[in-house]
Image (cartoon, helix red, strand yellow):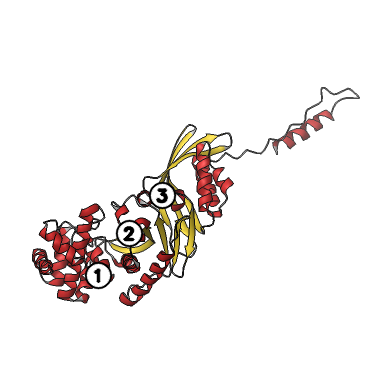
Amino acid sequence: MRWVAALVAALLIAGCGGGGAKSGAATPTPTPRAAATPPSPSDTTQLERLMQRRAAALAAGRTRAYAATATGPQRDRDREVARNASGLGLRDVELAVDSSDVSGRRATLEVQALYGVRGVRGRFGTERRIRARRTGGGWRVVSESSPRERHPWELGRVQARRSRHFVVLAPLTLEVGTLLDALEGGYGRMGEVLKKPRLRERYLVVVAGGAQAARSLTESIRGVESLAAISDAQVQETGSAQRVSAVVSQRLVVVWPPFSTLDAEGQQRVVTHELTHAALAGVTSGRTPAWLTEGIALYVSDDRRIDQAAQLRVQGELPSLRELSGPNAIARLSGDRQSAAYAYASAATFYVAERFGRKRLLRLFSVFNDEDLAGHAGPAVSAQAVERVLGISMPELERDLRDWITSAL
């Protein structure tokens, strides 16, 4: 080391003086350099660590630790949210930062808020915008907002109820015993009617206590407050046929006010309908028209709405198959128009099954996964599929279908 060499040289020079002459001023011993201080983590890294602490605290049910990641009024909101989530069996909670914008002492994060539930496959998530501020103790969250779905525990006190094939997250004040019976009954019926593909071992069910809660839980679906239940799946699609390559997560959302007014048979029919969607999620192309996707579920659950379709035709209020050819064509509707679309989808699917047979109905459903069926989702590719599988044109199918509906009067 350089400072050691300098000290040795100074001592040798001092020992060479004449007689007993005093040496000059004492030579100071150099001080070793302090070890280099590691650089502090970047703001981005600190913010990511903040999100990790926040997610871990929520998963563990540590209310104080979760609130400690925030500052100002957000801390009170966080305490309430963490208390609501405690005891639900959350797992694999993650706040994955997609992007961060740091400006001085403030930052805005775009985050994927993900969670799983013990006993249920997959994770469920939504997009979040989190604003943070640098304080004396480091970065802290000052606000958290979502452009889409909220998590159930963010809407109020929730408890988890479990049955053999379901985990139900429902408001604490709701008595949902009849729902558990309907869920298991629908699961059993599905095993009898639809042999393949098989249902998962267990599903997550989220119960919305009212219309506003339903909108908050599923803001991407219009008219949800008038529905009794929705099958909500997140999938990955590949290729020009938009085939589903993976089902990332699946859950059922039950809207309690309309569901609770149904009798036992009606509740089981609704559950069977949504479980059909859940079972077929992995084989449903992103190009499959809405009338067929919903029609299959109505058919499996034996939900015949032909009389309603006949009345709508007399009133001139039936939609067309062309209008319902988009994958989300029915989901975008609400009120009477959505009800009419469901009635027509039911009539169309029962008609195809009765005229052409169940096997060709299922073949029509699956043909949209074929890569050689060219085109994007919409009327053109739907017309190709109908002609290929049923051997008639789309206008001919619609004409015969409407005549058949009228004969039901």
Label 1 sits on a secondary structure element that is: helix
> Number of callouts in the render?
3
Earlier-in-chain disc, 2 versus 3 = 3
Q: Residue at x 40, y 51 (%)?
A: 126
Mark 1, Cα crowd under 10 Å, few <14 / some 14-19 / many 20+, is many
* Residue 97, image x, y percentages: 45, 47
Give the residue at the far right of this rendering: 20
* Residue 225, image x, y percentages: 32, 53
Label 2 sits on a secondary structure element that is: loop
Q: Residue at x 60, y 40 (%)?
A: 38
Q: Residue at x 52, y 49 (%)?
A: 82
Which label is found at residue 228? 2
Mark 1 lies on residue? 299
**Would residue 1 appear left or right of 377 to someone viewing this image?**
right
Spatial CA distance of label 3 from label 1 is: 32 Å
What's the residue type where badge 1 is placed? Tyr
Mark 3 lies on residue? 150
Earlier-in-chain disc, 1 versus 2 = 2
Mark 3, Cα crowd under 10 Å, few <14 / some 14-19 / many 20+, is many
Label 3 sits on a secondary structure element that is: loop
